[in-house]
Image (tube, grey):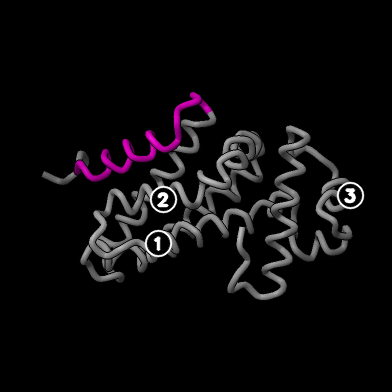
Amino acid sequence: MSDEGLTALEGSRLHASVRCCEFFISRGTTDLPIAEIAEAAGISQRSFHRYFPVKAESVSPVFDWTTRRFDEAILEAAPETDVSSVLLAAFRASLLGGVAERTSALFPLVFADREMWSVFLRKVHDGERSLAPVLAPRLGIPADTVAARAAAAAVASATRIALEAMVTTGAGPEETYMQTIDAFASGAVRRR
């Protein structure tokens, strides 16, 4: 997980967040005292509270990294690559590949914790907003349009749905993600 391009504080928060996530996974729960979480993250309780105003925010920098990695993967894709392939590669780069084990172990814990679930939903929304200007050029549309925002919302929602299906039904997140992208692309709710 690269913290390239981050400020020192952002890099420190990301490192602490990764350690927090590892600790939650190792213990199989997020219902842990802050003193234990801070110790496992290698920071003082004071630093913990400075980085994360509430415990649920301890996963926030990892989610921010995921969003940045998703956007970077789209930007790095060759211009001639079709949009579906680019979106799948971005999903793989940000949630599978080298972080697949963390994804499959962390999200059941996040979904079981109301506050962390709330942080996740807020980060999905933030990801949607950051994705619109990245995705729009790939789609050949202006970034400041409803179409760009709707496309970004579809991709962000497909990601959320894929992770939910992984947790609730054991479905493969990659397949569910692409099925959801296809469902959004079908225009099933188009005004007639």
Q: Secondary structure at mark 1?
A: helix
Mark 2 nearby-residue class (10 Å; few <14, some 14–19, many ≥20): many
Distance (Cα) linking label 1 and label 3:
36 Å
Residue numbers of the magenta segment: 168-187
Q: In this picture, is 159 found above or below 73?
A: above
Q: Which residue is mark 2?
A: 156
Query: On the rendered image, what quadrant is the C terminus found in?
Result: top left
Quarter of the rendering containing residue 9: bottom right
Label 1 sits on residue: 131
Marks 2/1: CA–CA distance: 8 Å
Q: Is residue 5 above or below residue 121?
A: below
Label 3–label 2 contact, CB within 8 A: no
Q: Which residue is mark 3?
A: 35
Badge 3 amino acid? Ala
**Residue at figure coordinates x 73%, y 66% from the top left:** 12
Does residue 172 show up magenta in the picture? yes
Seen from the viewer's position, the closer of residues 115 and 107 is 107
Magenta part, dominant SS: helix
Say left or right for 81 vs 4: left
Expressed as whole percent of the image width and height from the top left, the position of residue 37 reads 82, 48
Badge 2 vs badge 1, beta-carbon distance below 8 Å: yes
Indicate the amino acid at tag 2: Ala
Q: Is residue 138 above or below residue 170?
A: below
Residue 6 in percent (x, y) is at: 62, 72
Q: Quadrant of the N terminus?
A: bottom right
Q: Quadrant of residue 110?
A: top right
Q: Nearer the viewer, residue 80 or 95?
A: 80
Tell whether 26 sits left or right of 101. Answer: right
Q: Is residue 28 left or right of residue 170?
A: right
